[in-house]
Image: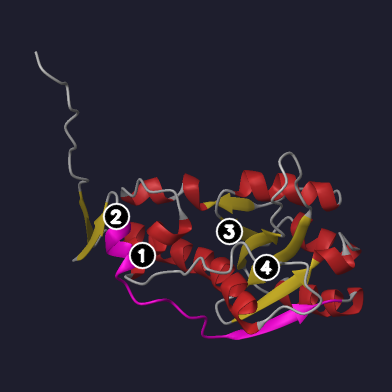
Amino acid sequence: MIYIKEKIDKAEVSEMEVETFPGRIIVIQTELEAEKAVNFLLTQPMVGVDTETRPSFKRGTMNKVALLQVSTSDTCFLFRLNMIGMCAPVERLLSHPTLVKVGLSLKDDIRMLHQVGEFASNNFIDLQDVVGQVGIRDMSLQKIYANLFGRKISKRQRLTNWEADVLNDAQKSYAAIDAWACLKIFDRIEELKKSGNYEVIPAPVVEEDRGDN
């Protein structure tokens, strides 16, 4: 029997070992590289997706998506959109009607990607619409992953410069894990639904302080 929690405590997550990406990471910086990567990705039935944007510390200013991560179970491609834009291969990937693309909070990612260029948003699955099917109420990638796999996804690189001339190893690993983790989560949820071999631990009930009567 597999035990999963309706909601997992942040303190519990902080004590877990940090997850590492076990596969290959391939950085895509030209349209030709993108074409080769997309040709491979379209041979897969499903991929995990995520995006990264250079943070803006000026009120009212938002940068465009700099990085699109697309991962299989063992290889993650990092498409540097700040260099190649919504080129034809990337548009073909995002619009492809049969390739399943799994991510988290996809409404925001898709909206931001449309600011880079137009594409048809075909066959996307948002994990936030799926995790409730096995009783999970948390909506963050870090908490969902920790709940299902007992390991922590580090967020230390989230606010780094995703438009840097060269992405460092820590950035590449962070970016790859986020897309890869989406695929792993979806696969695990499907396994649990098929087997039924799990039990949900309810979240503790927190009583409201009603003050003096």
Q: Which residues are magenta?
A: 8-29
The type of residue carrying mark 2 is: Ile
User: Which residue occupies 63% across, 75% down?
Assistant: 171
The answer to whether residue 165 is magenta is no
Marks 3 and 4, Cα distance to the nearest angstrom? 11 Å
Q: Foreground: 70 or 167?
A: 167
Q: Quadrant of the N terminus?
A: bottom left
Where is residue 4? Give x, y as percent: 26, 59
Residue under circle 4? 69
Mark 1 residue type: Ala
Is 11 one of the magenta-colored residues? yes
Disc 3 to disc 1: CB gap under 8 Å = no
Mark 2 / mark 3, whichever is N-terminal: 2
Pointers 2 and 1 in contact (CB under 8 A)? yes
Upstream in sequence: badge 4 or badge 2: 2
Q: Nearer the viewer, mark 3 or mark 4?
A: 4
The residue nearer to you, when weighing 126 against 173, is: 173
Give the labeled residue for mark 2. Answer: 8
Regarding residue 119, the answer to whether it shows in the image is: no
* Quadrant in which residue 190 is drawn: bottom left
Amino acid under disc 3: Val
Query: Which element type, helix, strand or loop, lies under badge 4?
Result: strand
- Say whether disc 3 or disc 1 marks the residue closer to the N-terminus: 3
- Residue type at numbered disc 4: Gln
Mark seen at residue 16: none
